[in-house]
Image (cartoon, rainbow, N blue to C red):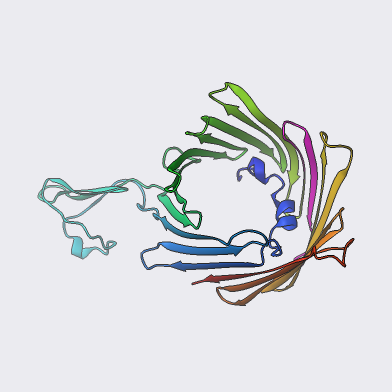
């Protein structure tokens, strides 16, 4: 049994349908991905805004693949007679010859042969990014290293121009019926945010809270309930200290058609209820179209097509249907290249 969705993802299916792959938010968006022979993935992103400067980011990501096959085992001295997996180690008699993150190699060929001690681990992921705002971001991920089901992230940010520093620690813990997270801002506050979701046979119940250590006060709290299966999902959330309520629904009608809607009400601003509906239609295996409209009359259209393996084009536009004669409309395009 898989773990339930995280608290922020209880309404993910509907939110993705309503917000993802609509390209009118920026006039142009470019993303280029490539992978080096040593496994390092490079990503270059650039985005122009309708108002404001162009933003860009250069990112490098390295994933340390898992190593080790299982528990300790012994190999006879005649290594050439057996088809063992090639290893680049230097063996020396009677002492520790090699030590690499995930396994140890001992050699005592005179009496007992070669003993390989494997200690499987899930590896780590290191991501470094440099943005046009001259921010240096580093993220280190340790998945299933500390304990089974526990993932830890260490994030740091440095702004040389402002001599500003940031450090955060994120913890994710997943079990068959539980998904819990904790986010610690080590330098600002310090503060902590927690959330947890319990799941059983598609039913989800979650809560979120924030705590400021310096003020010794709760800063926020939220709650959510939902139901999710492969074909459809529904959720009700109460955020902003239980003052902003939203209800969402998602339905995968068939392999080509998806539909969803979301209603929201802010109890602090009045009785008006915001409504937004969207639909997605897959034209063929390499392209799809999306459309949405909200209660204010803002409509958006999007088209995504895979031009060739690794090259994706996205086109989008939004229109104010109540003011078609005004210059309130937006268009945008997105290119994504992956080598």
Residue 253 visible? The answer is no
Quadrant of the image occupied by residue 244: top right
Task: Pick the residue in front: 201 or 156.
Answer: 156
Q: Give the range drawn in magenta.
A: 235-256
Say which residue appears at 86% left-offset and 54% top-offset.
Answer: 296
* Residue 106 x, y percent position in the rendering: 19, 47
> Is residue 46 placed above or below 172 in the rendered structure?
below
Q: Which of 98 and 237 is in front in this view?
A: 237
Give x and y (percent) for residue 304.
69, 70
Left or right: residue 307 versus residue 107 is right
Instruction: Residue 197: name its quadrant.
Output: top right
Q: In the rendered view, does 73 fall on the left or right side of 112?
A: right
Residue 260 highlighted magenta (yes or no): no
Q: Can residue 187 be seen in this view?
A: yes
Query: Residue 289's quadrant in the figure?
Result: bottom right
- Number of marks in the rendered image: 0
Instruction: Using the image as rendered, state which of residue 327 and residue 322 is in the foreground.
Output: 327
Above or below, comparing residue 144 to residue 208 in the picture: below
Front residue of 47 and 52: 52
Quadrant location of the N terminus?
top right
Residue at point 59%, 27% (across, down)? 211
Provide residue 280's location: percent of width, then percent of height.
77, 64
Q: Residue at position x 69%, y 73% from top?
A: 287
Q: Is residue 236 magenta?
A: yes
Residue sitting farthest toward the bottom? 308
Measured as percent of width and height from the top left, residue 36 is found at 39, 67
162 relative position to 183: left or right? left
**Predominant secondary structure, magenta span:** strand
């Amino acid at each position: 049994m898989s773990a339930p969705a995280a608290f922020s993802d209880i309404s993910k299916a509907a939110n993705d349908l309503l917000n993802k792959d609509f390209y009118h938010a920026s006039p142009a968006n470019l993303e280029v991905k490539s992978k080096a022979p040593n496994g390092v993935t490079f990503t270059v992103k650039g985005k122009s805004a309708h108002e404001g400067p162009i933003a860009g980011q250069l990112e490098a990501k390295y994933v340390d693949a898992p190593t080790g096959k299982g528990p300790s085992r012994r190999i006879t001295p005649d290594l050439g007679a057996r088809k063992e997996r090639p290893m680049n180690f230097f063996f020396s008699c009677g002492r520790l010859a090699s030590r690499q993150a995930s396994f140890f190699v001992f050699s005592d060929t005179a009496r007992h042969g070669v003993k390989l001690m494997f200690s499987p681990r899930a590896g780590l992921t290191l991501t470094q990014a440099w943005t046009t705002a001259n921010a240096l971001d580093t993220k280190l991920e340790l998945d299933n290293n500390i304990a089974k089901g526990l993932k830890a992230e260490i994030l740091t940010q440095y702004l040389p121009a402002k001599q500003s520093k940031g450090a955060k620690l994120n913890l994710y813990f997943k079990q068959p019926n539980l998904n819990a997270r904790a986010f610690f801002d080590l330098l600002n506050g310090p503060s902590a945010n927690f959330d947890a979701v319990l799941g059983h046979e598609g039913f989800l119940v979650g809560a979120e809270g924030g705590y400021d250590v310096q003020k010794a006060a709760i800063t926020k709290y939220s709650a959510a309930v939902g139901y999710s299966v492969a074909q459809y999902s529904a959720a009700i959330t109460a955020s902003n200290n239980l003052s902003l309520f939203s209800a969402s629904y998602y339905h995968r009608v068939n392999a080509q058609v998806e539909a969803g809607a979301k209603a929201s009400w802010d109890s602090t601003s009045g009785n008006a209820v915001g409504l937004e509906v969207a639909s997605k239609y897959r034209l063929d295996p390499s392209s799809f179209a999306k459309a949405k409209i909200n209660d204010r009359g803002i409509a958006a259209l999007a088209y995504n097509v895979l031009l060739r393996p690794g090259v994706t084009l996205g086109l989008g536009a939004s229109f104010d249907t109540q003011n078609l004669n005004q210059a309130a409309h937006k268009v945008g395009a997105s290119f994504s290249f992956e080598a």
